[in-house]
Amino acid sequence: MLRQLSHYMKEYRLYAILSPIFMVIEVMADVYIPFLMRDLVNIGIYQQDSQVVINIGIKMILAAIVGIATGVASARVGAVAGYGFGANVRAALYRKIQLFSFGNLDQFSVPSLITRLTNDCNQMSHAAMMSLRMGVRAPALFTFALIMAFNIDPRLARVFLVAIPILIVVFLIITKLAGPRFTAMQERVDDLNAIVQEDLTNIREIKTFVRVDHEKRRFKKSNDSLMQTAFKAIAVVIVAMPAAELVIYSTIIAILWLGGLDIVAGNIMAGDLISFLTYVMQILMSLIMLAMVLLQLTRAKASAERVSDVLTTDVDITSPDNGLTSSLDGSISYEDVTFAYPGSENNSLMDINLDIKSGEVIGVLGATGSGKSTLLSLIPRLYDVSEGRVLVGGKDVRDYDLTVLRDTVSFVLQQNTLFSGTLRENMQWGDEDASDEKIIRALKRAQAWEFVSKMPQGLDSIVEQGGTNFSGGQRQRLTIARALLKDPQILILDDSTSAVDMDTDAKIRRSFDTELQGITKIIVAQRIASVENADRILILDEGRVSAFASAEELMKTSSIYREIYESQQRGVVA
């Protein structure tokens, strides 16, 4: 995992090298000051030599300036390296998610992916920056200060042989306890993000059903769970500080006692003890600093594992090498197709065999859960078949370059999504170079120009996030227009006119009949009126083909079709 993630630091390698170098120089300056202080007291003050005091004082000031300058430089380049590393990881994570198939996306919840892109990447940035600075400062300060302390009084420095092992054991225990708690805390963040995203996305439904209080309670439960989990994780850190301070102050008391006896006995001078005590503080504080770094790295490790899980996930749908770059026509064939969603033991489609000619208009009917959307999602390879194969233009869809295949097949999903921006920008998702004339032509075909033309800003009209400033029927027509701009050979409308009135639905179908000849059109619908003029109608029942024929033939041969027809006719008569 470390080898994989270190790749994202290469761009900032120079900064990552300079930050520790500057930090070591700062540490050397910090360690040099107590050494000068010893001579200042023992020689300058004890002997009342003002010239020595001035000379040593100037050296101490210069050492402090060097320490401050290199400390600032280390912080600056360390921040660039740390946050640059985080930005690179975040970008790689985002690119990987964009490559995911629908099956891959089913493995991770959207809120979890959002947390990994934000919170987890931020934790890794902080850890990288802290590793380059505090992770270097702590061991360097410990080493240099320990050397200087033994240089002043080896006998007195033996106190560390007791204090340091105790601190190390305490910090190792704390670090081991903290790891699982920080992992659990990130999972609670996932849960909270899931609720927030769901509530904000469906705020209208929540208000409509007067469920605000219920959602408040649900949010509070998740928020409290995160708080409690965070408390458990932070409690480890809270325990660490008193334990460390107890050892530190006990060490200081022992040194003051033993050092005082040495001064009385004439074994050391006062300056030696003052300098020694400063090194003691530096040594023990460096251990505390190192413990904080280890705790941060423990938390970052939990985040890094979650990020690595995404980065190392195999994308199960990719373009083949030297994939086909063009389709012969819009014909579609299913050969002995069986499909089960990843992780599911039950097949959603079974033994599907179909032949659809190029340019045909195909209607698809079936009960909810019969597999209509699943069947059609196999054409542009949103999922891959479990068994059998799907052919477009006489070629297996797995042999096509993915971009070419998905440009050949224009799929209007059940969920009609528009993106924040302008209408023109949304339409150019279908063709980024589309002129206004081409956009307007597509809008007219989808019966959307009639309301767009009445908007004061026309194609420059603002679309709010999710297209919430348009009605459901308007969003459906706009997404159909966007799909038409791709000039596809195959157009799939997955229940994409359910929110429009029957008159508009009829106009859309007439427009398709006259202006989209030669394009294979597959229309999933709940209303028979939407598909009764199709060349053939496919009836799905529990993942199997129940019937596939014209409306006239189905009236004679398909009980499911007759039942749907009669129930809808009764509704019309009523």
Image (cartoon, rainbow, N blue to C red):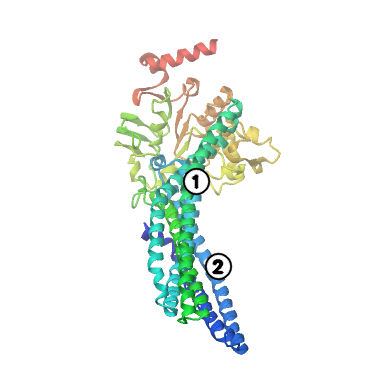
* The C terminus: image quadrant: top right
In the displayed structure, 90 sits above or below 191; it is below
In the displayed structure, 300 sits above or below 219; it is below
In this rendering, which labeled residue sits more in front, label 1 or label 2?
1
Toward the right, the furthest residue is 456
Spatial separation of the CA atoms under disc 1 and disc 2: 32 Å
Q: Which disc is residue 142 wearing?
A: none
Which sits in the foreground, 443 or 155?
155
Question: Splitting the image into 4 quarters, where does residue 362 fall?
Answer: top left
- Element at label 2: helix
Q: Is residue 385 left or right of residue 448?
A: left
Q: Position of residue 33 (x, y in %)?
A: 53, 78
In the displayed structure, 116 sits above or below 335; it is below
Q: How many marks?
A: 2
Disc 2 marks a residue whose amino acid type is Arg
Q: Position of residue 120 (x, y in %)?
A: 47, 51
Disc 1 marks a residue whose amino acid type is Phe
**Measuring 50% from the left and 58% from the top, which residue is drawn there?**
126
Which sits in the foreground, 259 or 196?
259
Q: Position of residue 489 (x, y in %)?
A: 44, 39
In the displayed structure, 416 sits above or below 556; it is below
The residue under label 2 is 76
Question: Splitting the image into 4 quarters, where does residue 381 fall?
Answer: top left
The residue under label 1 is 231
Q: Decide: marks 1, 2 in contact (CB < 8 A)?
A: no
Residue 419 visible in image? yes
Q: Position of residue 402 (x, y in %)?
A: 40, 46
**Number of residues whose C-alpha sits closer than 10 Å to that of mark 2, classed few (under 14), some (14–19) or many (20 or more):** some
**Measuring 60% from the left and 82% from the top, which residue is drawn there?**
57
